[in-house]
Amino acid sequence: MTFDLFMQYLTNGISLGSLYALIAIGYTMVYGILRLINFAHGEIFTMSLYFAFYGVTVFSMPWYISFAVAILMTAALGMLVERAAYKPLRESPRITIMVSAIGASFFIQNLAIVLFGGRPKAFPNVRLLTGVMQIGAVSLQRLTLIIPVVTIILLYTLLFLVHKTKTGMAMRAVSKDHETARLMGVDVNRTITITFGIGSILAAIGGIMWGAKFPQIHPVMGVMPGLKCFIAAVVGGIGNITGAVIGGFILGVGEIMLIAFLPNLTGYRDAFAFVLLIVILLIKPTGIMGEKISEKV
Amino acid sequence: MKKWLSILLVMLLVLSLGLTGCSSNAPAEAPADETPEEVADDDEVIRIGVFEPITGANAAGGALEVEGVRLANELYPEVLGKKVELVIADNKSDVVEAASAAARLVERDKVTAIIGSWGSGYSIAAGDIVRDARIPAVAASATNPLVTQGNEYYFRVCFIDPFQGTVMANYAFNNLGAKKAAIIQEVSNDYAVGLAKFFTDSFRELTSDEDSIIEVANYNTGDQDFSSQLLNISSKNPDVIFAPGNFTESALVIQQARQLGIDVPIIGGDTWETPEFIDIGQEFVEGAVFSTFFTSETPITKESEKFLDTYRSKYNREPAAVTALGYDAYILILDAITRANSTDPVAITQEIAKTQGFEGAAGIITLDVNGDAVKSAVIKTVKDGEFTYLDTIEPY
């Protein structure tokens, strides 16, 4: 394998990993704050693509406005799902909320089939993003480089938000203990809603870049990325934002390298994520960056 | 707040109910999950099951076939003085769902015959069910030999993959002058794997070189990233890439190949002929070449003209080959019912098996001992965003 070829595999892997990372952050943030796996996250990702698609095709908005509107609508959807499916069950056992999460996931999926139809649609092509460029012998889509840059910028913005702002402080407080945070004057419900909003915004940004890179959308397309990004979040240490990004990169680069070095195993590409999950649960159940979980008494 | 929310939720529920309600009231659309109302007057109605992917990865293919079946049903709504009712079952582009959708048609809807499915894998999954129930099934465009092999209840109105693979290998060798070929196949799809195998056999024979297939790359249904497989292929420098698979994945494969700077011809099979292939592949699929069943440019039979006229006036565009085949599957079953003069599925099966020189929209249908139609293949390409006719290849 030549150096050029290896670099091309690596850039593709990092680019795919960045997309996984953006979606994984949504899982990890919600888990951190509610100890809940938001199964509807993959569907929220799918809906962001449809919002952007209809913005461009039906309402003939320029792509940048349509994408911005789609991101805002996805955030609203994420917050609506939280209000509708999770908030009424705040005091219920965790298993009840989990069932509700699965229900929300199926509801959105089937709503999408009814509203948008089962046939795949072509995501609008944005030349500025999808154009091809040459670096030496390597031929790349511009997006391949844009995606990791966007992911890193968003990661640092988010880390700043969580660690340096009041909202972030409230989030960290709620993630430690709802009751105590409430007693200290933190509006717990508002903080949780904001968390869902931020997670959904990241899913939407990831979704739109996903659509630009792989321009095909259908109602159940969020299932596999949803599962894989959940695994990325667990591998990185669920609850930890930097961990989710690292998990996403490991998954993306791992998948691409698996195919590059062991082409015979290509059919098992999706299995790679699950094998990785099993291995990490056996070796280090808290994930790479995970904190030790101390059970509350 | 809580009240407002519950009102909103109730409205959403009502809305979604209303939406599903609307679609099941649409003309001729028999809902898959509701028992037809006319269960009581079984003697007055003949039910034909339409077994197709309506949702999922292959939905566009299924929709094209259903279009053809519906058109045929509108033109020929009756047989033996009874009304023919279509019962549409969605196999959800999934082999497990396919088996249960077929079982539902047979056991609950009590259909007399079944049409479908687009996608050989789904038809193969339904094979045992139709055989055990002794219900005839006619596939419109399932080309894998295993669909009908050893199953006297499964038939098809199209050619099979050993022929299609040979046609494309010949095209690569003779027309493109290719000596080395690479394959990228949808490994979780029986159709794609079968077609790739027949292409390989035939291409090796033509080049008299056992090593003429220099790389075989796989991907799964639903995959969206093919960059590593394509890089593996491009590092071996093939003259041509054969890429059998579903239309959406194939469109993405071609797009990503072009973006990675791979500029050799990419050729494939009949599944590519859906509008989505061009919508998703955009300018990247220009020049892609594939084999298919039928071209609307040269009507073959009287039935073709009737089909084309009705289709064009109704939809105002050119029909896809699989639409014509869906139409043919329907009229073939009706013809067999007329010949059998009975609605007994076994009697109908025997009549279908005897089909000789039947005039269908997509050509003359003569079924061989396996229940496969022996027909010519058509080669098409994408030119200026349209499927364009290149050549017709007669059966060998």
Image (cartoon, rainbow, N blue to C red):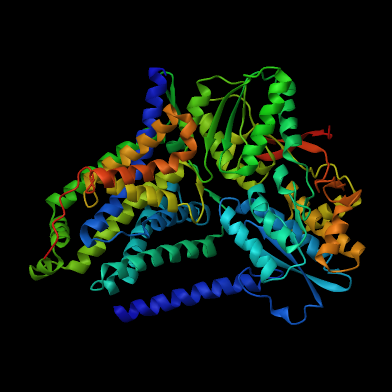
Image position of B14 (left or right of B333): left
Number of numbered callouts drawn: 0
Q: Nearer the viewer, residue A30 or B42?
A: B42
Q: Which residue sits furthest left?
A: A184
Q: Is residue B277 above or below residue A297?
A: above
Residue at 40 percent across and 20 percent down: it is: A4
Residue at 30 percent across and 36 percent down: it is: A149
For the question of whether residue B360 can be seen, the reply is yes
Q: Indicate the quadrant containing the C terminus of chain B: top left, top right, bottom left or bottom right.
A: top right
Residue at 67 percent across and 36 percent down: it is: B195
- How far across and down, in percent of the image, does residue A167 sit? 16, 58
Q: Nearer the viewer, residue B144 or B256?
A: B144
Image position of B205 (left or right of A127): right
- How far across and down, in percent of the image, does residue B187 sit? 56, 39
Image position of A98 (left or right of B25): left
Q: Indicate the quadrant containing the N terminus of chain B: top left, top right, bottom left or bottom right.
A: bottom left
Q: Nearer the viewer, residue B3 or A5?
A: A5
- How far across and down, in percent of the image, does residue B351 sit? 88, 58
Q: Is residue B301 above or below residue B45?
A: above
For the question of whether residue B93 can be seen, the reply is no
Image-quadrant location for residue B21: bottom right
Image-quadrant location for residue B170: top right
- How far across and down, in percent of the image, does residue A190 sit? 21, 66
Image position of B253 (left or right of B365): left
Residue at 81 percent across and 65 percent down: it is: B345
